[in-house]
Image (cartoon, rainbow, N blue to C red):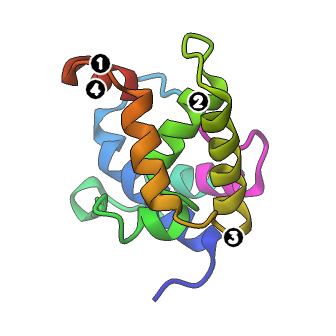
Amino acid sequence: MFGSLKQVTCIVGVSLSLALAGCQSTTPDQNLSYWTPQSQVAKDFVSYVNEVTDPKSEKFIPKEDRIAVFDMDGTLVGETYPSYFDWVMFTHKVLRDPNYKAPAYMKKFANQLEEGWKSGKLPKDAEKIHAKYSFESFKGMTIDEVQAYAR
């Protein structure tokens, strides 16, 4: 359905930006903090949004004709991101959270899991082991605390 990762990334970004363009302040923030700095995709994205939101541009799209698509059920996001969110949250907590002291066996698995989703070669029984260790890593936290941690 979609060609390249670049096209999908631009579609997601443009959709969100066009939807939110009417909500911007008079001095819009141009910072794409979760994007790779100086990436060509980010430059193309900003350029495209500037073109379609500039009334003087030939590519201008009036607000009433803008369409936003929000697809957060995993079909689009899942195609553009190499792992499940809960795997990323688990590996972050175990490997990078200075407030959590993970046992060595959990760190070993978290490293294997992260390398596995990057290389496409997951450890044997990754889902089962992740579920066990993830529950263990968040043991003792309330639902509100886990939600706050995820934010």
Residue at (29, 34) in percent of width and height = 23
Residue situated in front as seen by the camera: 78 or 99: 99
Image position of 110 with respect to 49: above or below: above
Q: CA distance from mark 3 to mark 4?
A: 30 Å
Residue type marked 3 = Lys
Q: In front: mark 1 or mark 4?
A: 1
Residue at (72, 43) in percent of width and height = 36
The residue where tag 1 is placed is: 141
Residue at (79, 43) in percent of width and height = 38
Residue 1 locus on image (x, y percent): 45, 89
Residue type marked 4 = Gln
Dot 3 crowding, Cα within 10 Å, few <14, some 14–19, many 20+ = few
Q: Quadrant of residue 41?
A: bottom right
Dot 2 crowding, Cα within 10 Å, few <14, some 14–19, many 20+ = many
Q: CA distance from mark 2 to mark 3?
A: 20 Å
The residue where tag 3 is placed is: 121
The residue where tag 4 is placed is: 147
Q: Is 40 inside the magenta-drawn segment?
A: yes
Q: Mark 2 or mark 1, which has the lower sequence index?
A: 2
Q: In front: mark 3 or mark 4?
A: 3
Residue 65 locus on image (x, y percent): 25, 65
Image position of 147 with respect to 116: above or below: above
Residue type marked 2 = Val
The residue where tag 2 is placed is: 94
Q: Mark 2 or mark 3, which has the lower sequence index?
A: 2
